Amino acid sequence: MASNTLILGLQWGDEGKGKIVDALSQEVHAVCRFQGGHNAGHTIKVNGNQTVLHLTPSGILHPNVNCVIGNGVVLSLEALDHEIKGLKDAGASFKDRFFVSSGCALILPSHISIDKVRDKKESIGTTGRGIGPSYEDKIARRAVRFGDIGDEKLLRDKITLLVSYHNRLLVELYNEKPHDIEDVISEVMSYKHLYESYCFDTQGLIYDWVKADKSLLFEGAQGTLLDIDHGTYPYVTSSNTTAGGVSTGLGLGPKYIDKIIGISKAYCTRVGEGPFITELFDDNAKMLAEKGHEFGATTGRPRRCGWLDLFALKKAVFTNSVTDICLTKLDVMDEFSSIDVCVDYKDGQPIYKTFKGWQSITVGTTQFDDLPLRAQEYINFIEEFVGCSISYVSTGPSRDQTILR
């Protein structure tokens, strides 16, 4: 009997989801993205070669796996076209295995302008790629959608209306230059080949696969603490990154999700602004950043680093009904003489439990019993505290550097 699995982040994103999705997608029929946009950055390393995916589901590197971008994703045609070309040059095939929902809201050049100028004033720390403004227009029922490209008159009317509205915002509110509506129409139409090749009723496709008892993998972007409702608002992304987003972002009910794997680093990182209770500012932070190569895969921005927050992790496990945890980047902790974990808060400050470091190499370890005893104790404590099995432990960036428990 087929099993459908959801993989999502339990922190502020950058947990290492791409590697895990890539490793597990070898055995499934399809990998499906359900939210976010090209603000995601999933890094996968295979045979020493590193690939960063921003829109394309991580299953694209397996030639027999189908890939779906669901209606919950906001779509940059320019970014999608660039990514497809790069992957094709690297040998990936898209024919008859890559499907994009006709319901995806498009990101227009005017969305990007609004995002950039607004963030200068609000200091949320967005990627400036138009994600938030595109979601705003979707909720306001004025979005231009991927399927609209098939009807040029409808497309022209919708872009004219939307960009006229954007131009009023840019000129009257932000004192910025307006966008030429004809230029925007021409730019969108220049990507009509994407519509002709990949636009699809993805909900109908997923329905057929479920009825045919095919195994599916649902791939989240960003992380739980960036969820628009359950994250550190207002320093969040513009979509539901939690488990509920699968149903709205792909169009299938929750009973079709059999397993939910939550990804967490063995420590915490965050990109951009917003609260981060366990953030470090000392040599430990520098060591985490250096050993963990903590720079954003999408923006290149250095990530803020800190100790693992088990209080927040426990809540994330509950919010998502997580059945299994994958703990990543354990090897980054190898040189620490002591390691703290946050077990509670008091007056806005973290309360820590301190572990002795294992100070030995775990890179590439594939058996739990081969880990240093102190590393095993660290993992077992996390598991007991949050009340969820740590079924996977990542000990390096490559597919084969993973412990299955």
Image (cartoon, rainbow, N blue to C red):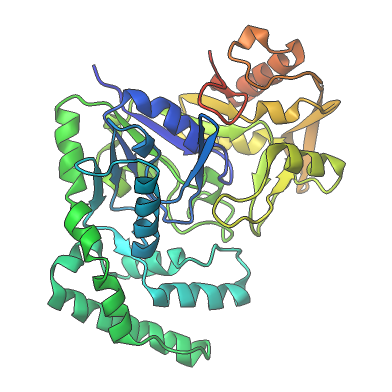
User: Which residue occupies 63% across, 69% down?
Assistant: 123
User: Which residue occupies 53% across, 87% down?
Assistant: 174
Location of residue 331 with respect to 218 vertically, above or below: above
User: Which residue occupies 73% across, 45% down?
Assistant: 305
Q: Position of residue 398 (x, y in %)?
A: 55, 28
Side of 59 relative to 17 (left or right): left
Q: Position of residue 173 (x, y in %)?
A: 50, 88
Side of 381 relative to 191 (left or right): right
Q: Position of residue 298 (x, y in %)?
A: 54, 54
From the viewer's side, name the closer residue of 117 and 401: 401
Q: Which of the 4 image quadrants contains residue 243?
A: top left
Q: Quadrant of the N terminus?
A: top left
Location of residue 173 with respect to 127 vertically, above or below: below
The answer to whether any part of residue 368 appears in the image is yes
Side of 207 relative to 61 (left or right): left
Location of residue 384 with respect to 327 vertically, above or below: above
The answer to whether any part of residue 142 appears in the image is no
In the orientation shown, which residue stands out farthest toward the top?
A: 369
From the viewer's side, name the closer residue of 283 and 310: 283
From the viewer's side, name the closer residue of 319 and 41: 41
In this figure, what is the number of numbered marks? 0
User: Which residue occupies 39% across, 33% down?
Assistant: 6
From the viewer's side, name the closer residue of 136 and 61: 61
Q: Position of residue 307 (x, y in %)?
A: 74, 37
